Amino acid sequence: MGRAGAPWPGAAKGGSVRAALLAGVLAAGCGPTGPPPAPASPSAPSPSASLSPGDLCTRVVAPWARELLAGGDTYGDYQSMGLSNRQHDVLREVVDAARAVRDERGDDAAVRSADRLARERCAARYRDGGPSEGPWQR
């Protein structure tokens, strides 16, 4: 039989060449192709890491206050908005006060008031820093 057990003539020789090529292509795609990557440099601190708790509160509360004054929807609870319970309390106070300003002096005044109130209320709520007691601190 001159085919060395291959199903058709030349299959034994051609099949081994194809198998070798396929193995070479697969092996080339699996290993490193250049020098190893450089070690990761120390990461820079996140922008929020350098903010005080009051400034961080202002940064997250003020945009939500503007969104709510514009008639936007919060699409869920305060946690889905990325707020802590304390920040949510500030947001409710700010929006309630800014809505009263809007009724008296219009939208622009309400937005300015909301930004100012967010800064003031966040500074007051966080003047002693962030949370210091509770089960998450133990």
Image (spheres, rainbow, N blue to C red):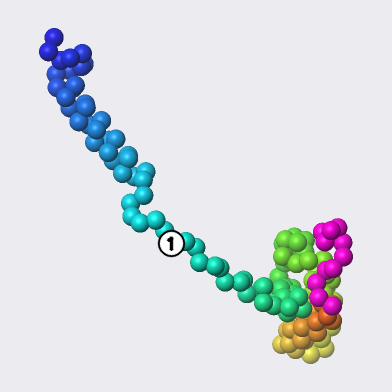
* Residue 104 vertical placement versus 67 (above, below): below
Residue 26, visible in the rendered structure? yes
Secondary structure at numbered mark 1? loop
Where, by quadrant of the figure, is residue 130 drawn? Answer: bottom right
In front of the other: 15 or 37:
37
- Left or right of 22? Residue 43 is right
The picture places residue 113, in percent across and down from the top left corner, at 77, 86
Where, by quadrant of the figure, is residue 44 drawn? Answer: bottom right
Q: Assess whether residue 90 is covered by the magenta stretch.
A: no
Q: Mark 1 points at which residue?
A: 38
The picture places residue 96, in percent across and down from the top left corner, at 84, 77
- Quadrant placement of the N terminus: top left
In front of the other: 53 or 137:
137
Residue at horizontal 84 percent and vertical 68 percent from the top: 132
Q: Residues within 10 Å of mark 1 (few under 14, many from 20)?
A: few
In the image as oriented, which residue stretches furthest toward the left?
2
For the image, the number of numbered tags is: 1
The picture places residue 40, in percent across and down from the top left corner, at 49, 63
Residue at horizontal 77 percent and vertical 83 percent from the top: 119
Residue type (three-letter) at the residue carrying disc 1: Ala
In the image as oriented, which residue stretches furthest toward the top?
1
Residue 99, visible in the rendered structure? no
Residue at horizontal 82 percent and vertical 61 percent from the top: 137
Secondary structure that dominates the magenta span: loop
The picture places residue 70, in percent across and down from the top left corner, at 71, 76
- Quadrant placement of the C terminus: bottom right
* Residue 134 vertical placement versus 49 (above, below): above
Magenta-colored span: 128-138
Where, by quadrant of the figure, is residue 3 drawn? Answer: top left
In front of the other: 4 or 110:
4
